[in-house]
Structures are given as structure tokens and as C-alpha cells.
Image (spheres, rainbow, N blue to C red):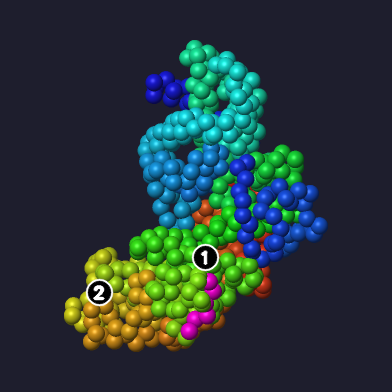
């Protein structure tokens, strides 16, 4: 049966380049918002022009972009959208697929290599999804969208293929494609079971390369052979995947069908509606978590959930207020009972909520257990790894790899094994390591008063004789003591904004920016340095001509 079904479905893979809702409830509270949480609420565009200026008006301001595959997170969210299967069930199904890797984002098309496990895994997922949907009366009715009158109801099968196919492939199906899917009714007649054909259609669509990959054909641009302008359906996909982390819903596809994603004003208005939805906020929070390295934390799950809620709340407030940098210097944070005990900070009236830090030991994101969980090593914190995270992730500075003869998997050997940490990490006598460790360890030691999950401490674990000074230095900027002071120094460097922009662009285009993207990155950095509003930065980017166009790779 596997071979038979595979042969019936394989035709779908050949259509990947042949053609150029599940609604959500809840709204976010981001800057410039205050409206509804549905893409369709932007119908008719915006009263302002939102015409891009300068480099944002140049179609070739972004470099070439290759073929992108859905990340596991995007795939799971899109499957949930099109089928209604709960996320936890889909996560089990998706576990058969190879992992995405991290650069630090999970959507880098440069490492998305095709493989036999990927193909086999996707086929098993398509079968499992079809079986799950058709076995559940509620999901079956929602996905089919019609009630078959019998095993030979070709009209119902065609209607299902047309509606479901548009949602899965993110564009209308051609008449030839619909005829191909409708022909599966012959199998249903032979088996005397309509659901046999429905399963084949569902599996074929989910196994189609145009579902797993983001196909962007576009329209050629005159006098620019390496440039294409995306059509409205391709724009709907770009907006949905960037702003919601999944494929477009029916409402957004309707906008594309009605030509409402054609002008910068229309795109800006649609993007605003997407961003102000709760899912838009969650996507921005997730982008920060991937960038800064706390999307997954190797600590107790309950504590990790509370820590993530704290950081998400501080980010939401700074994004809503249009002051992104304030997240690094915030004098308040959001705590629940778990974190109050963890940080030893009292809750107001004993209820979860916003709390003013009692002293300067804590200020901003760098004092959160999320960021401080990065770099746990050798059963404790690693000043080197923490310093590296600050130096490379937040400031976008580069650190060369260690010499080939150095094993970074071994504990530091700057001093005796029973020495205090400052001595064990002292690499000044190791000339091949001294320069980098001098930069990184100086940062990390300024955060040593915080344990592997951000808890406060004054001595090393199990070593009352090893007191922690908690004093550090940010190279070429100044000395500091503690997370709050480091946050202030990072803001003073003027590098945070540019580093955020580079990482945001990387998240948006699926690869690290290079010289071919410099005009876009520089223009966005200038805008961001001027107004410090990450949401407005995002809206300006998606309304730019560079986002509307694609330069061909190679």
C-alpha cells in the first residue's frame, strides 16, 4: 500500500516551480498598534502613503536569496493552521525530521540540505496527518469543508482540493492541478469510500514541495535580469512567515486575491495588523530568544517557563513603548511566585506582576535568568561563554576560533584545579589564548554574582573561601559591576542597534547579511538609531522595495 500511495502522490513533487483561516484570537500591545488582530482588518490600505525613501526605495537593496525550506517551527505552526491538529501532537509527528541547526536562527537556507530522512519523514507526516484529520469528525468537517454525498462525490473532492490546496500551497491551484486531484475520486469509487480519495488529496498536498519550500517566482523586472517582483500571494507568504512564523491564513490570502498587497501603503497596513496581533508579538519575542540564545534552556522546565515569561514581558513593554533600548536598563521586571523565590525579591501583595528592583544588582535583560543561563559549563557558570555571548551576540563582534591544539571542552587550566575561579581562568601566561580571554573573561567575571539560572550568590558553589567580586570590564568602554551596569555600558557603546538590525535582517532573509545587503542594513540602522522603535523598523522594512523584490541567487 505504501508503494501504491507513494506513486499516486509523487506527481505533486514535480510541480514545485510550475506556478509563479485558521483565525487566531488575542491581540498584542505593540508600538503603533491598538487595532484588531486580523490581517483582513487592514482592508483598503492606510491613509498615509508609507512610500519608502532612500535605499528603502531601491528594489536591489537586498542581496540574492535562495530557496528556503520551512523550519520545523514554521512547519508545525503551518500544519496547525491548515489542519487544526494540536501543537503537541504535531510536535510528536515532526520528531522524525532532521533538526534545523542554529546560526543562531533556525531558518538559514544555507544549511537546509535535502536528504532521504527528510523525504521519508515528510511522507510519514503527511500520512499521519491525513489519518488524524479523517478520524476526527470535527477536524474532518473543518478540513474538508463539505459533506460528501457518497464515494463518487467528485464536486466535494474538487471543492476540498481547491480550498485546502490554496491554504497549503499559499496560492490558488491551476485548473490542471484541480483536475489531477479530482481524478483521485476513481480510487474512492473503487474502494467505495470517499475518505480514501480525501486522504490521497490531503497527503499529496502536504507532500508537495511547494508546501515545504517557499517558492518565489515573481515577475521579471525590466533592465534587471537578476531581479523579480513578487506577486501578491508571494508577498502574503513573506509577510506571514516573517511576522507570524507560519503560512498565510485565508484572510491574508483573500487580500492577495483582491490585489490588496500591491502598494507600500497596503503592505504597511497589513503588516501593522499582523504585528499588533498576539502572534506578531510572540514572533518578535521568539526572534530575540533565538538571537540571544535562550530559546531553549538547560534548566528545570517550570523555572525556565517563568524566566521566559519574565523576559517576554519586559520585551513586550519596551516594544509597546517604542523604546527598545530600555529593555537593557529597565528598573522593573515581571515576577511570579517561582521567580520571586528564585531571585529573593518580594511580590507586591503576593500576586504576580511588575516589581521594582530593590537595588542596583539587577537592571534590564542582562539580569534575567534567561540570558544568564547561557554558557553554563563544567557544572557552573563560564565567564568565557558569558563574555562571548555579550561580545558576539549583542555587539556583533567576532572572536577567532581557539587554536587547534586547544580543547575548549576541558576545564580552564590557568591555575591549580583547586584554585578559585579567577585564578583557574587566568590565561595571561598562555599567549595563544590571552588576547581573546582577556576580552571575554573580563566581561563574564562582571556577571559572576549570578548563578547558572540568574540566582544571586556571593561565593563560588561549595567554596565559601572563594568570594565573588563581580567586577568586570567591557573592552574600550569601561569597568562595571553587575548586569545593570553592563546594560548601561552596552547602550552607551551605540552598537546594540546595529547588531539588532543585522540579526533582524538575517532572521528575515534566511542567511547572514553580507556586502550585498549593506545598503539595506545601513539604512535600517540609521532609522533605528534615530527612533529606537523596533516595531516601526520592522514595518519600514516590509514596506521597502527590497522586501517586495527578490534578487536571484547566482
* Disc 2 secondary structure class: loop
Please report the residue visible at 56 percent of the width from the left and 39 percent of the height from the top.
82
Point out the stretch of residues depicted in magenta: 353-358
Please report the residue visible at 49 percent of the width from the left and 51 percent of the height from the top.
107
For the residues bearing labels 2 and 1, Cβ distance under 8 angstroms: no
Q: Could you give the CA–CA distance between mark 2 and mark 1, rounded to whole angstroms?
A: 34 Å
Q: State the quadrant of the N terminus.
A: top left
Question: What label does residue 412 carry, if any?
Answer: 2
Asked if one can make out residue 347 in the rendered structure from this viewpoint, the answer is yes
Q: Is residue 424 magenta?
A: no
**Within-10-Å neighbours for mark 1: few <14, some 14–19, many 20+:** many
Name the quadrant containing residue 183. Answer: top right
412 or 521: nearer the viewer: 412
387 or 433: nearer the viewer: 387
Please state if 80 lies on the left or on the right of 271 as rendered: left
Residue 420 position (above or below residue 195): below
Where residue 259 sits in the image (x, y, percent)? Answer: 75, 42
Q: Main secondary structure of the magenta part?
A: strand
Where residue 281 sits in the image (x, y, percent)? Answer: 58, 59
105 or 144: nearer the viewer: 144
Residue 390 position (above or below residue 284): below
Where residue 310 sits in the image (x, y, percent)? Answer: 49, 68
Instruction: Tell me how many marks there are.
Output: 2
Of badges 2 and 1, nearer the viewer stands 1
In this figure, which residue is indicated by the disc labeled 1?
312
* Disc 1 secondary structure class: helix
Q: Earlier in the sequence, mark 2 or mark 1?
A: 1
Asked if one can make out residue 554 in the rendered structure from this viewpoint, the answer is no
Where residue 78 sits in the image (x, y, percent)? Answer: 53, 43
509 or 75: nearer the viewer: 75
Amino acid at each position: 500500500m505504501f508503494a501504491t500511495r507513494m506513486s499516486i502522490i509523487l506527481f505533486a513533487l514535480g510541480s514545485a516551480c510550475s506556478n509563479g483561516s485558521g483565525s487566531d484570537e488575542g491581540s498584542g500591545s505593540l508600538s503603533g498598534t491598538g487595532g484588531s488582530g486580523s490581517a483582513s482588518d487592514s482592508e483598503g490600505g492606510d491613509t498615509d502613503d508609507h512610500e519608502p525613501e532612500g535605499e528603502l526605495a531601491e528594489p536591489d537593496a537586498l542581496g540574492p536569496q535562495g530557496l528556503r525550506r520551512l523550519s520545523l517551527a514554521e512547519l508545525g505552526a503551518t500544519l496547525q493552521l491548515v489542519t487544526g491538529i494540536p501543537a503537541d501532537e504535531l510536535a510528536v509527528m515532526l520528531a522524525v525530521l532532521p533538526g534545523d541547526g542554529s546560526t543562531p536562527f533556525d531558518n538559514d537556507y544555507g544549511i537546509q540540505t535535502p536528504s532521504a530522512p527528510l523525504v521519508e519523514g515528510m511522507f510519514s507526516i503527511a500520512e499521519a496527518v491525513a489519518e488524524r484529520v479523517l478520524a476526527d469528525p470535527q477536524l474532518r468537517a473543518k478540513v474538508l469543508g463539505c459533506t460528501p454525498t457518497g464515494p463518487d462525490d467528485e464536486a466535494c473532492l474538487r471543492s476540498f482540493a481547491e480550498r485546502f490546496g490554496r491554504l497549503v500551497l499559499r496560492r490558488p491551484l491551476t485548473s490542471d492541478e484541480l483536475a489531477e486531484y479530482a481524478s483521485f475520486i476513481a480510487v474512492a469509487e473503487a474502494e467505495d469510500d470517499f475518505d480514501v480519495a480525501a486522504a490521497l488529496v490531503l497527503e499529496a498536498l502536504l507532500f508537495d514541495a511547494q508546501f515545504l519550500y517557499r517558492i518565489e517566482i515573481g515577475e521579471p523586472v525590466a533592465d534587471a535580469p537578476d531581479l523579480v517582483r513578487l506577486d501578491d500571494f508571494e508577498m502574503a507568504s513573506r509577510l506571514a512567515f516573517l511576522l507570524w512564523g507560519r503560512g498565510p491564513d485565508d484572510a491574508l490570502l483573500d487580500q492577495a486575491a483582491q490585489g490588496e498587497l500591491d502598494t507600500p501603503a497596503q503592505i504597511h497596513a497589513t503588516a501593522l495588523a499582523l504585528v499588533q496581533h498576539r502572534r506578531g508579538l510572540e514572533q518578535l519575542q521568539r526572534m530575540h530568544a533565538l538571537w540571544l540564545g535562550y530559546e531553549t534552556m538547560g534548566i528545570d522546565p517550570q523555572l525556565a517557563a517563568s524566566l521566559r515569561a519574565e523576559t517576554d514581558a519586559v520585551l513586550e513593554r519596551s516594544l509597546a513603548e517604542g523604546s527598545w533600548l530600555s529593555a537593557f536598563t529597565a528598573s522593573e521586571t515581571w515576577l511570579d511566585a517561582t521567580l520571586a523565590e528564585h531571585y529573593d525579591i518580594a511580590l507586591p501583595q503576593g500576586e504576580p506582576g511588575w516589581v521594582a528592583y530593590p537595588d542596583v544588582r539587577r537592571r534590564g535583560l542582562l539580569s534575567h535568568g534567561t540570558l544568564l543561563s547561557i554558557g553554563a559549563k563544567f557544572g557552573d557558570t563560564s565567564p568565557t561563554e558569558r563574555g562571548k555571548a555579550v561580545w558576539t551576540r549583542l555587539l556583533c563582534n567576532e572572536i577567532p576560533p581557539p587554536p587547534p591544539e586547544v580543547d575548549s571542552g576541558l576545564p580552564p587550566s590557568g591555575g591549580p584545579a583547586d584554585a578559585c575561579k579567577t585564578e583557574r581562568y587566568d590565561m595571561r601566561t598562555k599567549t595563544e589564548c590571552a588576547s581573546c580571554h582577556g576580552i571575554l573573561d573580563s566581561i563574564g567575571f562582571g556577571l559572576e554574582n549570578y548563578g547558572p539560572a540568574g540566582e544571586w550568590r556571593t561565593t563560588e558553589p561549595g567554596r565559601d573561601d572563594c568570594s565573588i567580586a563581580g567586577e568586570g570590564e567591557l573592552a574600550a568602554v569601561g569597568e562595571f559591576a553587575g548586569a545593570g551596569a553592563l546594560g548601561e555600558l552596552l547602550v552607551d557603546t551605540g552598537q546594540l542597534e546595529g547588531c539588532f538590525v543585522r540579526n533582524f535582517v538575517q532572521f528575515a532573509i534566511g542567511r547572514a547579511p553580507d556586502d550585498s545587503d549593506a545598503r539595506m542594513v545601513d539604512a535600517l540602522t540609521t532609522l533605528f538609531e534615530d527612533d529606537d522603535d523596533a516595531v516601526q523598523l520592522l514595518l519600514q522594512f516590509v514596506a521597502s522595495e527590497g522586501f517586495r523584490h527578490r534578487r536571484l541567487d547566482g
